[in-house]
Image (cartoon, rainbow, N blue to C red):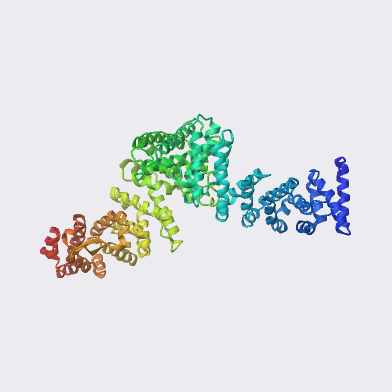
Amino acid sequence: MAAGSGDGTATLKRCLGVLRDARNDSEQFAALLLVTKAVRAGEVDTKTRRQIFDAIGFTFPNRLLVSRQPPAGCPPHTFRALGLTLLACFCTDPELAGHSQILNKIPTFNDILVSPCEPDCTSMIDDAYQCLSAVMATARGPRELVTKGTVCALCQAYVKSGYGSDRALTLLLGLLAIAEAKCWQRDAPHLLAVLSKLSDDFLKAEDMTKFELCEVLPRFVPLSPPLTQDPQGRECLHRLYKGLADILGSKLSQSQRDPALKLAACLVQACGSEWIPAGSAGSKFLALLVNLACVEVRLTLEEPDPVEAEGKKEVVTACYVLIEMGIQECLREEKPLLEDMQKIQLMRIMEEAFGAVIFYLRQVKQEKLEDPFIFASVRILGAWMAEETSALKQEICEILPFLVHYAKKLFQEGSPAVSLPQPELVSTEGSDLPRDALRFLLPGFCHLTAEDRPRDILIAAGAPALLCDYFLHQWQLLTSKPGSPAPLTSAEMSLQTLCGIFLNLVVTAPDLIRRDKTFSSLMDMLLKSLPLVLPQKDHLVLAANFATLGLMLARILASPAVLQGTQPAKEFFGATIRFLSQAHAAQAEPGSDTLAMAVSPDYGSAWAELCELWLLGMQALAGCVPLLPWLPQAVLQARWLETLADLLTRVDPASVDFELIAAFQGVLVELARASKACRDVIVSHHGGEWANLYGMAALEQCLSEQ
């Protein structure tokens, strides 16, 4: 076999002939020893490997793996090692690597990695790694490896630091890149042990290893469950913080700073700012982190030909994560990590960075709009616009038409994201979801529609029609998953913010509401939606938004036939009356016999969000009464007047604040003027008396006139 390659091939063919014709195990074993020498010498091409498999098949290697009786004078693992070498040879054929006979051996390969390693067993470990690597490269392989315990075996092999542990780390990185969530679900304790070792090495390293580990560590930082929930995880985070503080506090080259910023961004994505300790050192580190991110964004995006190098896009996207944390920390009032002066300085530095982001976006060409980096840039700009309304006003007004165009293009095409908000920083699982730029722009648009110039720009760019379409889309998303859990979904938050935008337009641009058919469609949608959402207690704030927006629109759009006593209109107003009438109740005052006006228990937890909407809804309902002749009858059917009269009679007038009295009086006056039947109910329930008691002068006068 040691002869020239031509002779070797001929010998190999003779060995294969012996294998096929072998009369007993001894002959087959002798031929196999020669075959494995050729395999190890690397003298076997793909075609010959297939011939070896055709001559041997899986049966004989399987027997070798389970045999415990080696030939006389041979080490105890001889048969097993031979069987492994054959399987490693077979695995070089991708078709065989995915064969069920190989997949069934995954537990065997795992065992070899975690078993004590004798000096003469290293070839078995090499073969096991070769088999596992080949399996991972197949379609079914990663799933099979995760379910058959390979992650646990690789973790143990790496933590032991024995022979081949570097290959264990490489395979782990590959599996986490493909199936991060499943790996953490099944093997969190073992992966934490690896992270513990890596973070320890990271803190102690004084050479280039420190920067190499910056590239490896992000794969071992899980997005869920958070590391902060586990004592060992918190220790890892503290070591990573100290290691990063060492790096970023030193003078660095670009190649050293970039991976450190990416690691910091990964930790922010997984844990927010919780991994940064409170106190002076932590606040300085956080300020430094955001500062460095802003400088990096400016240096890159203000170039004439920015981010052409793909690597720079990853770094700048990581910087966006750090800047978004900076925005949140500058707004944080409870237990802030930053001092007031640091916040002022950071806001100024971030403003400069966002100037660079806008400068970059204004140069984007139509054909580049599919680039995920554009999405990341729009997303971070949306986060800034949501919180900072005074800075960069001129620049933001100039970029608004582009933002509307970009959001519209993504929404209409439903283009799949190459990767979700952070390319290269999060697992690719779930990355087939459509990119939704509007979701991140809505809070900023809500602020801007309250101001004349940006509102005019948004209207001219076609934002109302786009937002109406988006409203319908989000409503469909919300209702496609009935019985959704109580926490706010992104669809519900988007719908609430959209209602805020439309309310701004209703108040500031009523002419637009009248002439743009978009708002008739929106009204139609609200008529059908509110009766569905109001009965669900988890969605009370959304119902309040729907009710108030619908009432405000109805005041302007009262003439269309859709509002003149149709069934959807009656159901909508019936639901609105229920929402408004059930907000308050009489409640016993502690240590007193008297009753006080209080917010109803069902409304209590959300009243901070509901209060303004309720007051606005009451004003709008009062405005609708003279426009819709059938509306007083709906109020009578709901028996709201009787309930309200009873409530005002029972409670202590001192417990009812002025705003509430004004809201009740506004609706009661309009009902009394528009309907004799309503006036009669109010009078018969001593309306004159409690109107006088509460100082409702307009209601007193109205009742006395007729």
Which residue is depicted at the point 45% across and 40% down? 322
**Above or below, 347 relative to 608:** above
> Residue farthest to the front?
73
Quarter of the image containing the N terminus? top right
Across and down, in percent, residue 656 comes to 19, 59
Name the one closer to the observer, 461 or 597: 597
Quarter of the image containing the C terminus? bottom left
Across and down, in percent, residue 579 comes to 30, 62
Query: What is the quadrant of residue 461 in the picture?
Result: top left
Query: In this view of the protein, can residue 703 be seen by the observer?
Result: yes
Name the one closer to the observer, 584 or 109: 109
Across and down, in percent, residue 97 comes to 71, 53
For residue 316, side relative to residue 661 (left or right): right
Across and down, in percent, residue 186 comes to 57, 56
Query: In this view of the protein, can residue 365 be seen by the observer?
Result: no
**Above or below, 413 relative to 633:** above
Name the one closer to the observer, 260 or 47: 260
Query: What is the quadrant of residue 344 in the picture?
Result: top left
For residue 402, side relative to residue 55 (left or right): left
**Above or below, 268 relative to 624:** above
> Residue farthest to the left?
704
For residue 13, side relative to residue 431 (left or right): right
**Number of callouts in the render?**
0
**Above or below, 361 relative to 430:** above
